[in-house]
Image (tube, helix red, strand yellow):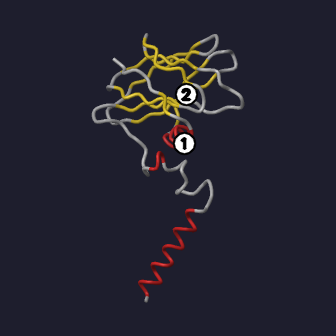
Amino acid sequence: MRKFLAGVLALGLAGTLAGCGEDSIFTREYNAWGTGSFPVANDGQAALYIVREAGPGDQTPIEITIGTQSLVNIVPPNYVRLDLDPRLYDLRAYGPSKNKELVITVAPGQTRFLLAQLTPDGGAQLLELSQEQGRRLARRGQRLYAPTIK
């Protein structure tokens, strides 16, 4: 009888937690792609996510390049995942009239998040995000695919 009551209480608690609203750990936003985890770096590589946050009526694309290679034009609320070999990378974000550079070094097994955003002077920039912020923004958008980095 005690096992039965414990089971009923556990089911009731799980049902209560599942209905707690947006901050519940059981929401789709927390649970990326329904898997319970977030995709991390491949063996021997780093995963770099570049995300774009949705703004009111903002659909201006931001072009992202690495070195001289054009990668993707990001519009909100989408993101791109790059699987990179460990080394130094020269990233640029191009806005309507200006661009800004960000030089980063990635290590094997590392997962990093950058926010691509427009600046008031007509440019674009890349800003480092925490794991929590980056994952939250990536889950809100759709993945865009970029060419393989050489």
Seen in the image, is 126 located left or right of residue 34? right
Q: Looking at the rendered structure, which numbered label has been put on residue 51?
A: none
Going 47% across and 29% down the picture, which residue do you hit? 80
Task: Give the image quarter of residue 124.
Answer: top right
Alpha carbon distance from label 2 to label 1: 15 Å
> Can you identify the residue that label 1 sits on?
136
Within 10 Å of disc 2 (Cα), the crowding (few <14, some 14-19, many 20+) is: few
How far across and down, in percent of the image, does residue 52 sit? 57, 30
> Decide: marks 2, 1 in contact (CB < 8 A)?
no
Within 10 Å of disc 1 (Cα), the crowding (few <14, some 14-19, many 20+) is: some
Q: Secondary structure at mark 2?
A: strand
Going 52% across and 50% down the picture, which residue do you hit? 30
Above or below, 19 against 9 in this view is above
Disc 1 residue type?
Arg
Q: Earlier in the sequence, mark 2 or mark 1?
A: 2
> Can you identify the residue that label 2 sits on?
127
Disc 2 residue type?
Leu
Q: Nearer the viewer, residue 142 or 45?
A: 142
How far across and down, in percent of the image, does residue 56 sit? 71, 31
